[in-house]
Image: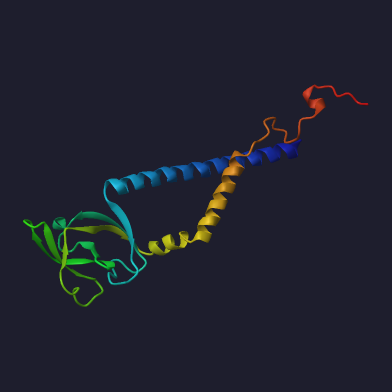
Amino acid sequence: MTQARHSTSSRSAWSRIGDWFLNILALGGVVCIGLVICAFAFNITLIMFKTGSMSPAIPAGSLAVVQRVPAASVEVGDVVTVDRVNELPVTHRVVTVDALPESGKTYLELKGDANEYADQGLYEVTEVRKVLWSVPGLARVIVYFSNPIVLGGITIAMAGLVVAVFWPRRSDGSGTEPSAVNSGVEVESR
């Protein structure tokens, strides 16, 4: 009897731990949904830095949160991402701003913090993506977790956790199958 009771209490502890873990995951899911809604509402996206042209402020492998803003709102010293035709976007620090309000165009001179010289030519833009903040090394983590094998493993682990937490349990607490003697039902023997 003590062994059955011990088994039930440890199972109950595992059930509580599983429930707690699922609640944390559900809260994380709600936060993610909220972040996606905010991203759409406020034109916020993520960019990953492959090069070290913005080092030491933003080293290679960093992940940055950027917001699409009118180019006229940019100031010297801001770090912005500028889209280029038939090329990858460039993210550098603003060196000079020349806004032409009548045309709605702004000319930016940009320079990477690690670069000796400013970029060649001016960027003619109407809007840019301004870097709000960045986290060094986080891009590598995102790339790792976007690997299909890693995603598959996480999915299988989470499915197993859900099954373990919601698997039907006995309600009598004994841990044994109910028998005819325990249930008060008479069994006829031949």
Q: Is residue 186 above or below residue 165?
A: above
Taking the view exactly as shown, the residue that stands out farthest to the bottom is 116
Taking the view exactly as shown, the residue that stands out farthest to the front is 86
Total numbered labels: 0
Q: Position of residue 104 (x, y in %)?
A: 11, 56
Q: Quadrant of residue 174?
A: top right
**Left or right placement of residue 107 versus residue 46 in this view:** left
Q: Quadrant of residue 33?
A: top left
Q: Position of residue 42 (x, y in %)?
A: 26, 48
User: In terms of depth relative to the viewer, which is nearer, 149 or 49?
Assistant: 149
Residue at coordinates 46% horizontally, 62% vertically from top-left? 144
User: In terms of depth relative to the viewer, which is nearer, 170 or 150?
Assistant: 150
Q: Is residue 166 above or below residue 83?
A: above
Taking the view exactly as shown, the residue that stands out farthest to the left is 102
Q: Position of residue 121 (x, y in %)?
A: 16, 73
User: In terms of depth relative to the viewer, which is nearer, 95 or 18?
Assistant: 95
